[in-house]
Image: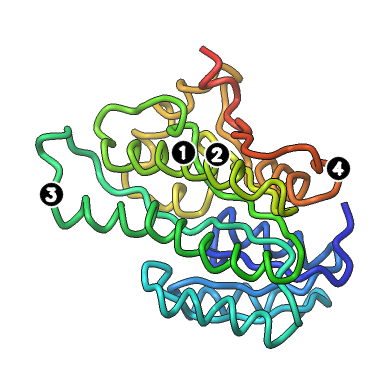
């Protein structure tokens, strides 16, 4: 999977799956625009890519703000002339609470980041891709786009919404050479997960969700993103690709 001189945008690129995907695209020859609300971590990711000989830029962005997202796409095009691939990856998890106990402010934040922001990124990316004759979008959905985890109602709902948005847009723009699909990861071993204070208690419960008997690794997700973005997946439109160790097959 080579992406020489392709222009790629990755949101949520400062850490975890987003950082790994951005680095993988850069290693494969792409120009990569990193976008994240965390300036410090974003700059660190950029430095790592450049130290490895990759070509990239970073922009601090609040993905929930329409004007910032519009300008992010515009800056990417100003720099490199087009936008070939988007990994629409920014998201947050939220805390544990039963549905009736969810705090409204937290509900609003999860909806804004996990759903509205996904739509905003798609909106401005699709507009650009239609102008240039095509492109590829890979949304980060979740195993919880296909099942539920009690105590995570807002997250479950937003990830179901991402699945619906992915399918709808994929059908709408398939004839315009814009391919839109989504990955549905299970629980992935990221630094954010490892740094949780309750990780020792949490890991056995999360591991038990996966029939394979372990959590996923970041590189296992990254390879799926690159494959979906490549010409090898040219007949895939509106697919929800499970990367979950068998969780949602049960």
| Residue 232 image point, x, y percent | 86, 42
At horizontal 75% and vertical 53% (from top left) the residue drawn is 177
Dot label at residue 167: 2
**Mark 3, mark 1: which one is toward the viewer?**
1
Q: Earlier in the sequence, mark 4 or mark 1?
A: 1
Nearer-the-camera pick, 48 or 198: 48
Determine contact: label 4, label 2, CB under 8 Å: no
Determine contact: label 1, label 2, CB under 8 Å: yes
Q: Earlier in the sequence, mark 4 or mark 3?
A: 3
Q: Secondary structure at mark 4?
A: helix
Q: Is residue 132 left or right of residue 112?
A: right
Q: Secondary structure at mark 3?
A: loop
* Residue under label 1: 164
- Whole-number angstrom distance, CA of label 1 to CA of label 2: 5 Å
Q: Earlier in the sequence, mark 3 or mark 1?
A: 3
Instruction: Specify few, some or many for label 2: CA neighbours under 10 Å numbering under 14, 14-19, or 20 or more.
Output: some
Dot label at residue 103: 3
- Whole-number angstrom distance, CA of label 4 to CA of label 3: 44 Å
* Residue under label 4: 232
């Amino acid at each position: 999977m080579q992406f020489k001189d392709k222009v790629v945008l990755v949101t949520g690129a400062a850490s975890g799956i987003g950082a790994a995907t951005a680095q993988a695209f850069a290693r494969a020859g792409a120009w990569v625009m990193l976008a994240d609300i965390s300036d410090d971590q974003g700059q660190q990711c950029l430095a790592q890519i450049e130290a490895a000989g990759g070509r990239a830029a970073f922009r601090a962005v609040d993905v929930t703000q329409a004007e910032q997202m519009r300008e992010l796409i515009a800056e990417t095009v100003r720099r490199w002339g087009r936008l070939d691939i988007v990994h629409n990856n920014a998201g947050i998890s939220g805390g544990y609470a039963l549905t009736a106990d969810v705090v409204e402010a937290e509900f609003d934040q999860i909806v804004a980041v996990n759903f509205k922001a996904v739509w905003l990124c798609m909106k401005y990316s699709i507009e650009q891709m239609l102008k240039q004759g095509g492109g590829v979008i890979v949304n980060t959905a979740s195993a919880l786009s296909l099942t539920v985890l009690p105590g995570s109602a807002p997250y479950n709902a937003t990830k179901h919404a991402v699945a619906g948005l992915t399918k709808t847009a994929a059908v709408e723009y398939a004839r315009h050479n814009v391919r839109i699909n989504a990955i549905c990861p299970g629980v992935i071993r990221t630094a954010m997960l490892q740094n949780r204070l309750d990780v020792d208690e949490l890991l056995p419960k999360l591991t038990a969700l996966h029939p394979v008997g372990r959590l996923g690794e970041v590189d296992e997700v990254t390879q799926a993103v690159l494959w979906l973005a490549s010409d090898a997946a040219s007949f895939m439109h509106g697919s929800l690709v499970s990367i979950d160790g068998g969780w949602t097959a049960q």
